[in-house]
Image: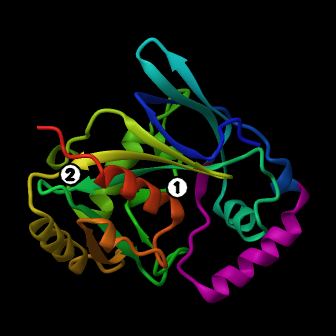
Amino acid sequence: MSRIPNGLYRVVRLETAYRAARWDFAEREAARIDAHWARALAEKPRLFDGKVLMLRDAEIVATPEGDVFRGSFFDTSFRNFHAWFGFGFPDRDVHNCFAMAALRARDGAFLLGEMGDHTMNGGQIYFAAGTPDRNDIFGDNVDLAASVARELEEETGFAPEQAPAAPGWIVLVSDTKIACIQERRLPFSAVEAEARMSAFIARDPEPEFARFHIVAGPQDIDPGRMPDFIQAYLRDALAHTISP
């Protein structure tokens, strides 16, 4: 179980390591996991059983510079992660920890994407994000800022230098889920940014996002399709103006 209570935390940085480890759940439930994966593929054939990273030992530590989020990742097959999710998170000592790019336009509005029907979370509305994988491992560390930059460009078409990061991170903890959100600031209005991103995904034969949504105020938050942690982030962030 996480040592971090559910809630929203402001941290100055993330310090996440890579530590190869066995996962007892995946070994113990291998046959059941394979059957679950076969059913998932029958429903969504484009799911891919690559390697993903999951987190243990999550904590927030006070330092002289401010609070820091720490934890250690291990790698496992996506089918194991998918089954852990589908079985109701039977091992609560591990976490689905991922980084997200909260794209914010120059007018203060946020831009989110609606996941395509072929994805695991089809129809849900998220910031650009992805489950960390081996591309995010550098030596003994997992670089979630690199994960954000990669997913930002792959899913929206904006290169990292086009949307520089605001200082710090917001970490949202919700039971076995930990979202590390980095605000990325665009030099465009929300309408212009949405048009650019829509043109980008129109050129992609298999985009992650089907369309984009502008959230300029609380009235634009969609409780039915936005996860609770996204709603919590937006309500908090919309209460704060962009620093000059």
Residue at left offset 72%, top offset 61%? 80
* Image color mode: rainbow
Determine the image quadrant of residue 200.
bottom left
Residue 160 in view in this figure: yes
What amino acid type is highlighted by mark number 1? Answer: Thr
Cα separation between marks 1 and 2:
19 Å
Q: Is residue 33 magenta?
A: yes
Which structural element holds mark 1? loop
Indicate left or right for 117 with 31 as reference. Answer: left
Residue under numbered circle 1: 131
Residue under numbered circle 2: 159
The crowding category of the residue bearing disc 2, from other C-alpha atoms within 10 Å (few below 14, some 14 to 19, many at least 20), is: some
Q: Mark 1 near mark 2, Cβ–Cβ under 8 Å?
A: no
What amino acid type is highlighted by mark number 2? Answer: Ala
Q: Does the magenta stretch include residue 197?
A: no
Q: Which badge, 1 or 2, is on the more N-terminal residue? A: 1
Say above or below: 1 vs 31: above
Label count reads 2
Instruction: Report the span colored magenta.
Output: 28-53
Residue 204: where, in percent of width, then height? Answer: 27, 76
Which structural element holds mark 2? loop
Quadrant holding the C terminus: top left
The crowding category of the residue bearing disc 1, from other C-alpha atoms within 10 Å (few below 14, some 14 to 19, many at least 20), is: some
Indicate left or right for 178 with 157 as reference. Answer: right
